[in-house]
Image (cartoon, rainbow, N blue to C red):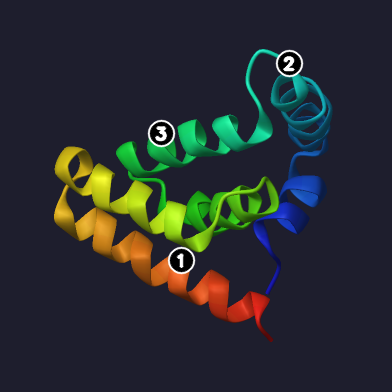
Amino acid sequence: MFSATEALSRLAPKLDQLTREVLFDDVWRRGALSPRERSLITLAAVLGQARPHALAFHLRRGLDNGLSAEELGELLTHLAFYIGWPSATAALEQLDAVLADQTR
C-alpha cells in the first residue's frame, strides 16, 4: 500500500511539484506568519472542512513547528464548539496515535 505522498508523486507529479515548491517552499515560509501560526490555522481549516485524511500529517507538522501536545489538545477542545464534538474527539484519537508514533 502506498502513502498519499507516494501516490501524489507517482500519479500527479505536477501536483506534487506544486505542493512542494509553491505550498511548502513558498507559502509556508512567508514571513508574516510563523510556521507555528500556520499550523494552527491549517489544523482548524482541515478539521472544519472534515478532511481527516490530512489531519495526521498536519498534526505531525504542528508538532514539528513547535506546538505542544497540550496546545494541540487545547486547539481541539476549542474547535469542538465550532466543528462538532465527533470531529474533535476523532481528531483527539488521531493526535493520540501521532504522539504514540513519536515515542516509538
State how far apart marks 2 and 1 are (Cα).
27 Å
State how far apart marks 1 and 3 are (Cα).
16 Å
Three-letter code for the amino acid on which mark 1 is drawn: Leu
Mark 1 residue crowding within 10 angstroms, few (<14) / some (14–19) / many (20+): many
Q: Position of residue 65 (x, y in %)?
A: 67, 45
Write the residue at 43% across / 67% down. 94
Q: Up-down: is 71 above or below 82?
A: below
Q: For mark 1, give the secondary structure.
A: helix
Q: For mark 3, give the secondary structure.
A: helix
Disc 3 versus disc 2: nearer the observer: 2
Q: Position of residue 72 (x, y in %)?
A: 44, 54
Disc 1 versus disc 3: nearer the observer: 1
Left/right placement of residue 85 relative to residue 17 reads: left
Left/right placement of residue 58 relative to residue 14 reads: left
Q: Earlier in the sequence, mark 3 or mark 2?
A: 2
Q: Earlier in the sequence, mark 1 or mark 3?
A: 3
Mark 2 residue crowding within 10 angstroms, few (<14) / some (14–19) / many (20+): few
Three-letter code for the amino acid on which mark 2 is drawn: Gly
Write the residue at 77% across / 57% down. 6
Task: Find disc 3 in the rendering and name its residue.
Answer: 45
Circles 1 and 3: CB distance less than 8 Å?
Answer: no
Left/right placement of residue 92 relative to residue 29 reads: left
State how far apart marks 3 and 2 are (Cα).
20 Å
Write the residue at 65% across / 50% down. 61
Question: Which of the 4 image quadrants contains residue 48?
Answer: top left
Question: Which of the 4 image quadrants contains residue 49?
Answer: top left
Q: How many marks?
A: 3
Task: Find disc 2 in the rendering and name its residue.
Answer: 31
Task: Find disc 1 in the rendering and name its residue.
Answer: 95
Q: Up-down: is 7 above or below 33?
A: below
